[in-house]
Structures are given as structure tokens and as C-alpha cells.
Image (cartoon, rainbow, N blue to C red):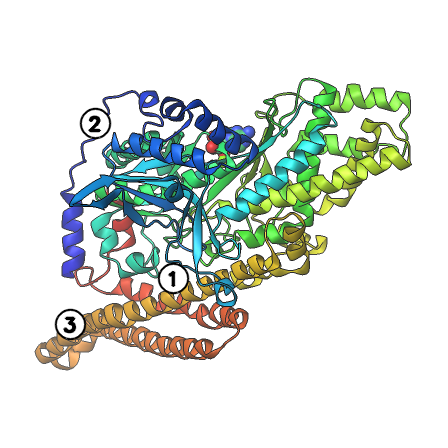
């Protein structure tokens, strides 16, 4: 056995669980390291507190005097907790999060020093931004970027650093991060939804979008993961024969959480508590060594920050427990991949969840309004919704019969399907008193206020209504949720804006009553959104055919899917809703295409290296052993040797054939890469990587995996699937 594989296995076998001490109640720890409302109350003057709260609730500007007070209070609080540095924490367009630490420490002359952190350092920073992706924005504009404080997400202490959530924009105002457009989308959905809410309740002042994510991940022993160059460099295995036992028994899903993993989770959860991330659920997932973690849902911007922070935190805590967390959407072939369901809803400042049925016909009409508008929004922008979850890694999952397909559709359950069918029959124009009563009593009056238990959970749907929220399930496990949340909230905002215009027009021109007008518009929306509703099996090939007939998009790969981001329709949408300018939209497209190219390029290089330098030489070594043995047999038994050595000769030939195939295919792959690299246009280049380079991955893998089965286990250099997946 190779030394690396042997040492990795030996280390794993000797692992002792890392002790975790939990001596406080979780509710006592919650938010301990967050500069949250209660901390602010304690540390801020009344003026400063109100200034910040106004900024959070109403988006008002914080003036310099207040900023100075807040920063000095933050510093005092942070120093009391042993903090030495501060950072503006932001989410660049690739990678997870970025931070640059500065010490509070400053010299003041005369050999003296103080801890300093003023309002200006809190509000704005100018990190050297030249190495962050900008999709051409900064080539045409200024070379600098700046970060600016986002008071809607509280500062927190991470290690010995005070982290201040910020946006990251260019000097000319273009967003260079994921947070800025998300905040704009949340603003858009707030104003559009609030305006629609006024039909039902004049007291509604604000509508908030909520997100509850469910993070799936694999936990692999660190020594084993480190022993595989593919996992280390690409986050997934590029080869490896499937283990004799996989997930077919489903015993992991129902089983108890293994103790080493449980210790990791407890440690992680404690850290989450301190950081105010309200994690609540943990359980095993379908695949061996796969788990899920979910919090209680929060306001979307905060939830996005918390998920980004969590992904970072997971890696750090895992190494304390000698684990490596794999967030990749498909770390192992033949084993379920990981996603990140985005549970989404809208709620009012008066405490009403707009996606939950109410107790009165009127509140149910409000529910149906938001419910149907969401369906219509998804119907009209399904291709954009697919685009926003596209990535090289998520391509492995979508359409691979385990995760939602690459076709976006909406599942609503039998009961609501019936309700929509009835609404579709509403009279065009004025309703008769009889019809109004009927609708009131039998349709909107009949929606049970607890749909939760009634919605049969169609697990194959990429976008499902689950009782009081929509669940966007096609999101990948590595995704920054800001992206799907940006698109979802924007398309719903746009839809609600249209709705308001149409209803108002009917009231005005056709002299309809408010609820008559609403019924009329909803009826048309139901008719117009039929193609997106699908209750059947999303994994089946029948659905692919049917979806095609309906005219739904089915973009299976990232280069195909991303195009919808820069369609005229998408650019116009983002501009109209003030979420992104055309420049910002195009920049993101470029960056994602480039990222796709780089990921496939790296995978191609790593695969070429492992197949050529690890697998082939090992196969040759084993083949030499066989050859030695065969010649030995010949020496002893003379011409009779063939009877004895027939199988081995066969094996020698097979090994030769596989080695030959690997060499040829690696050469071809390298040539395809060379050709692709010469292409200037980012789109054509991405397509070349997708359709000309990537297909060799499976072919090369096939021969390597065959060799894994033939070669003496003790010679095999790479840690095997059974070791990666079943070591505890
Ligand atoms: P599942 O059966 O899919 O695991 P759960 O009920 O456990 O569903 O919820 C999953 C996630 O959905 C959690 O993060 C939860 O907080 C969140 N969630 C529940 N209700 C809402 C809501 N109204 N809006 C947004 N997210 C919600
Ligand atoms: Mg779920």
C-alpha cells in the first residue's frame, strides 16, 4: 500500500473523539458574540441606538456623529472580549467571504499607543480590491473599490476579530459583491409587496423576506481526505470505484449520528450560538457520512450572512475534530450529492406570513394573491431561476435523478391545485352576489389554516410549496444564498408591481370592486401559469418530454444555463427593479463563465495528473509482478505453464489495454484543453470546456476505476471509496 494511504488509514483508526464541553445552556450563549439589539441597548446612548434602529428598520442614513458613537461603543464591547483586530467582512463574487484584518492598535507619538476605532473606520474602508473578480467593471472604471457598513446585519466577534458585515462596491457605485444586489432586491420586494398588502390591511408598513436554509455536507476524516489530491484540489473525487456497499440500505439516514460526527456538530452548534446563528436541526442524510444542518429561519439578508459564516466556520471546527467538510454538490459518484434547500416566505411588520393561509376569507384572498403571484413570477422567469443556481459543481446534481431536475417547475399539492381550478372559473368582469358568496364560503373560506400536514411532500420538485413557504430545492450546497434570494425576491417584486397596476386599472376602468378586480387578475394569472405547475415525478424521463412540450427550459449545463442571465428580459428586469444595472448583470455573467472554465480546467489537470502519475505507474508495477510470476511459472513448468498462467496472462493484457486507453484519452483531453485555451470569447471557451474537455473525465475515470478492481489492494495508491465513506 502506498505510504500516504497507509498512514491515513492508520491515523483514522487511532482517532479518539475530541472532547466537547457544554457547560452552559444554549439559550444563554445565544448571540453572546454579536453586537445585537440587546448589546446595543447596553452600550449605546439613546440617540445612537435609535439612529441604528432607524437605519435597520427604515434604511435611513446614519450620520457621522452617530457613527462615531457606535464605533466607540463597538470597540469598548469588543475590547472587553479580548478582541484585537477588526475587519470589514464581505462576500466577493467568487469564493465565500473576504476579510482584511486591521489592529485597533495605533501609535500616537512619544512612544505611546492607543486602541483606536473611529466612525470612519466603521463606515467605510478601501481594501486593495484589485485581486477580487469584477467582470470587467473595474477595467472600464476606477481601479479602487470600497466596503461600506451594512447596519442590517450586526457586527460579530469571530476569533479575536470584530467583523463588520459590509457591502463592496466600486468607486463609481457598481456592486462588486453578492450582498449589494440582494439588499436592493429586498428593498424592491418590500415596496412592491407592501403596496399590495394595502388592499387587505392599511396598517402594513413593511414586508420582509425570510430565508431558512438547510445545509447538506459530507464529513470525511481529514487524513483520508488529505490523502486524495482530487479532494484536496477540487473538493470532489475525480475517480474511485464505488464501494461494495453504498447507500442502498438507507441505514445511514435512519441511523444514529456517529459519535465523532456528533462531537463536531455540538462544537459547531456552540460556536453558532455564540455568533447568533439559530441552528436547530441536525441529522444524517441519505449517503454515508452525509449530514444536514438547519437553523430557524431569519430575515433573508441576515440568513445569507449566517450561511456564509457557517460554511467558513464548519471548515475551522472540522479541523479541530480531524475532519474535512466537503460542501461540494457531488463529492462521490454513485452516492447522493448535497444541496441547500432555500425555504422562503414573505411576512409583514404586523406579523402575518403572507404565504400562510389565514382564518378568514379575506386573509385567504391575501394568501392566494401572494401564492399565485409567486407562481406567476416563477412561470415567467423559470430560466433565470435555473441560471442563478448554475455552477460546475451543481451540474452534477441537477438532473442526476437524486436532486431536482434542471427543469424548474412548481409543486403545490392536491388541495391547492383544486383551489386554483375553482378560481380559474371565476366570471370575467363583475361577479354576481351569488358567485361572491360562493367564493367566500366554498373557495377562499375553505382553505384549511394548517396546510402543513396536508401538503404531500413531493421530493422531486425543484420549487415546492410546503404549507407556509416555498422551498427552492435546486440550490447547490456550495452556493451563496444571496444569489437565489436576489433573483427570487426580484421576480416576485416585479410580479407584484404588475399585479398592483392591473388590479388598479380594473378598479378604475371597469368599475370593479377591489376583491372582484383581484379575483379577475388572479384568474388570468392561473391560466397563464399552467406550464410551470407540475405535481408528478420530476426525476422521470416522461417529465422531460412533457416539459419540452410545455416550452419549459431544460438547460443541463452551466454554459447553457447562464445565458438566461443576460437575456434582454433579465437585464430589463434587474434594471427596472433597481437591483442591478446592465453593467453589473453582465459582469456577473462573465465572472461565472470564467469560474466555470477555471473549475473544469483545474479538474482536467488534476485528473490527468492522478490518472497518469498515480494510477498508471501503479498498474504497471502490478503488471510487472504478474509478468514475473508468469515467467517464473514458465521456468518451472515449461510448456505446461499456459494452463496455470492463463488468467494472469489475460489480466496482463487487460491492464495493458486500460493503460493504453488512459494514455490516449489523457492526450486527447490535453489537446482539447489547448484548443479551448486559445479561444478568446468567454462563452465559446466555456462551451469548449463543457462539451470538448469534460466528456473525457468519465472516459478516463472508467479505465482507472477498472484498474482499481484489478490491481492488488496493497499497491493501490489512492484511498478507496469504502475507506472514505465508511471510516468513522
Ligand atoms: P424540512 O422538512 O424540509 O426539513 P422544516 O420544517 O424542518 O422542513 O424547515 C426547514 C427550514 O425551513 C428551516 O430552516 C425552517 O426554519 C424554515 N422555515 C420554516 N418556516 C418558514 C417560513 N415561513 N419561511 C421561511 N423559512 C421557513
Ligand atoms: Mg426541506
Q: Is residue 76 left or right of residue 681?
A: left
Q: Secondary structure at mark 3?
A: helix
Q: Quadrant of the C terminus?
A: top left
Q: What is the distance, in whole Å, between disc 3 and disc 2 at their CAs?
A: 53 Å
Q: What is the distance, in whole Å, between disc 3 and disc 1 at their CAs?
A: 51 Å
Q: Is residue 475 visible?
A: no
Q: Residue furthest bottom?
A: 639
Residue holding disc 3: 625
Residue holding disc 1: 131
Q: Secondary structure at mark 1?
A: loop
Q: Is residue 616 left or right of residue 42?
A: left
User: Which of labels 2 and 1 is toward the front?
Assistant: 1
Q: Is residue 129 visible?
A: yes
User: Which of labels 3 and 1 is toward the front?
Assistant: 1
56 and 434: which is toward the camera: 56
673 and 630: which is toward the camera: 673
255 vs 681: above or below: above
Q: At which x and y percent is residue 439?
A: 81, 24
Q: Earlier in the sequence, mark 3 or mark 1?
A: 1
Residue holding disc 2: 21
Amino acid at each position: 500500500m502506498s505510504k500516504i494511504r497507509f498512514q491515513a488509514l492508520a491515523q483514522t483508526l487511532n482517532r479518539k473523539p475530541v472532547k466537547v464541553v457544554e457547560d452552559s445552556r444554549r439559550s444563554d450563549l445565544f448571540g453572546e458574540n454579536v453586537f445585537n439589539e440587546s448589546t446595543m441597548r447596553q452600550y449605546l446612548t439613546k440617540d445612537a441606538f435609535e439612529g441604528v434602529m432607524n437605519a435597520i428598520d427604515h434604511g435611513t442614513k446614519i450620520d457621522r456623529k452617530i457613527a462615531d458613537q457606535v464605533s466607540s461603543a463597538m470597540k469598548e464591547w469588543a475590547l472587553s472580549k479580548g478582541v484585537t483586530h477588526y475587519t470589514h467582512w464581505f462576500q466577493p463574487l467568487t469564493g465565500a467571504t473576504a476579510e482584511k484584518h486591521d489592529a485597533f492598535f495605533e501609535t500616537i507619538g512619544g512612544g505611546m499607543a492607543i486602541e483606536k476605532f473611529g466612525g470612519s473606520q466603521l463606515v467605510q474602508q478601501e481594501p486593495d480590491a484589485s485581486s477580487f473578480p469584477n467582470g470587467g467593471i473595474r477595467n472600464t472604471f476606477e481601479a479602487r473599490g470600497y466596503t461600506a457598513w451594512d447596519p442590517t446585519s450586526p457586527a460579530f466577534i469571530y476569533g479575536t476579530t470584530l467583523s463588520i458585515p459590509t457591502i463592496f462596491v466600486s468607486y463609481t457605485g457598481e456592486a462588486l459583491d453578492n450582498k449589494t444586489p440582494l439588499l436592493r432586491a429586498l428593498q424592491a420586494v418590500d415596496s412592491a409587496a407592501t403596496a399590495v398588502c394595502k388592499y387587505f390591511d392599511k396598517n402594513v408598513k413593511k414586508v420582509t423576506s425570510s430565508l431558512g436554509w438547510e445545509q447538506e455536507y459530507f464529513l470525511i476524516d481529514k487524513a483520508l481526505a488529505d490523502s486524495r489530491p482530487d479532494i484536496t484540489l477540487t473538493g470532489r473525487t475525480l475517480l474511485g470505484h464505488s464501494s461494495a456497499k453504498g447507500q442502498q440500505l438507507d441505514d445511514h439516514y435512519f441511523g444514529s449520528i456517529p459519535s465523532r460526527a456528533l462531537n463536531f456538530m455540538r462544537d459547531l452548534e456552540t460556536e453558532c450560538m455564540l455568533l447568533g446563528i439559530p441552528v436547530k436541526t441536525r441529522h444524517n442524510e441519505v449517503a454515508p457520512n452525509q449530514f444536514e444542518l438547519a437553523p430557524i429561519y431569519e430575515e433573508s439578508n441576515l440568513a445569507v450572512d449566517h450561511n456564509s459564516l457557517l460554511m467558513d466556520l464548519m471548515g475551522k471546527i472540522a479541523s479541530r475534530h480531524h475532519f474535512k467538510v466537503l460542501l461540494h454538490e457531488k463529492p462521490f459518484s454513485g452516492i447522493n450529492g448535497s444541496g441547500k434547500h432555500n425555504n422562503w416566505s414573505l411576512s409583514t411588520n404586523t406579523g402575518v406570513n403572507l404565504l400562510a393561509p389565514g382564518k378568514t376569507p379575506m386573509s385567504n384572498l391575501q394568501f392566494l394573491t401572494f401564492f399565485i403571484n409567486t407562481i406567476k413570477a416563477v412561470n415567467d422567469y423559470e430560466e433565470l431561476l435555473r441560471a442563478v443556481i448554475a455552477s460546475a459543481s451543481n451540474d452534477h446534481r441537477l438532473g442526476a435523478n437524486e436532486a431536482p431536475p434542471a427543469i424548474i417547475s412548481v409543486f403545490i399539492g392536491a388541495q391547492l391545485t383544486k383551489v386554483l381550478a375553482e378560481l380559474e372559473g371565476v366570471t370575467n368582469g363583475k361577479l354576481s352576489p351569488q358567485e361572491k358568496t360562493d367564493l367566500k364560503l366554498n373557495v377562499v373560506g375553505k382553505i384549511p389554516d394548517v396546510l402543513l400536514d396536508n401538503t404531500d411532500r413531493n421530493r422531486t420538485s425543484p420549487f415546492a410549496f410546503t404549507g407556509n413557504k416555498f422551498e427552492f430545492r435546486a440550490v447547490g450546497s456550495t452556493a451563496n444564498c444571496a444569489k437565489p434570494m436576489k433573483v427570487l425576491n426580484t421576480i416576485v417584486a416585479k410580479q407584484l408591481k404588475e399585479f398592483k397596476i392591473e388590479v388598479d386599472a380594473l378598479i378604475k376602468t371597469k368599475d370593479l370592486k377591489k376583491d372582484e378586480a383581484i379575483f379577475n387578475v388572479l384568474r388570468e394569472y392561473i391560466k397563464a401559469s399552467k406550464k410551470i405547475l407540475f405535481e408528478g415525478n420530476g426525476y422521470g424521463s416522461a417529465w422531460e418530454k412533457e416539459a419540452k412540450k410545455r416550452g419549459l427550459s431544460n438547460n443541463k449545463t452551466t454554459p447553457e444555463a447562464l445565458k438566461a442571465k443576460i437575456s434582454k428580459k433579465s437585464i430589463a428586469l434587474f434594471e427596472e427593479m433597481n437591483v442591478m444595472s446592465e453593467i453589473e448583470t453582465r459582469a456577473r455573467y462573465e465572472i461565472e463563465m470564467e469560474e466555470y472554465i477555471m473549475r473544469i480546467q483545474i479538474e482536467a489537470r488534476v485528473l490527468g495528473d492522478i490518472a497518469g502519475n498515480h494510477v498508471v505507474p501503479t498498474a504497471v508495477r502490478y503488471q510487472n509482478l504478474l509478468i514475473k510470476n508468469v515467467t517464473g511459472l514458465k521456468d518451472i513448468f515449461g510448456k505446461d505453464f499456459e494452463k496455470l498462467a492463463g488468467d494472469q496472462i489475460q489480466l496482463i493484457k487487460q491492464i495493458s489495454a486500460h493503460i493504453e486507453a488512459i494514455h490516449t484519452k489523457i492526450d486527447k483531453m490535453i489537446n482539447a484543453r489547448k484548443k479551448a485555451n486559445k479561444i478568446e470569447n468567454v462563452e465559446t471557451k466555456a462551451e469548449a470546456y463543457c462539451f470538448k474537455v469534460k466528456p473525457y473525465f468519465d472516459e478516463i475515470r472508467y479505465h482507472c476505476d477498472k484498474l482499481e478492481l484489478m490491481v492488488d489492494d496493497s499497491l493501490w495508491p489512492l484511498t478507496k471509496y469504502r475507506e472514505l465513506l465508511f471510516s468513522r
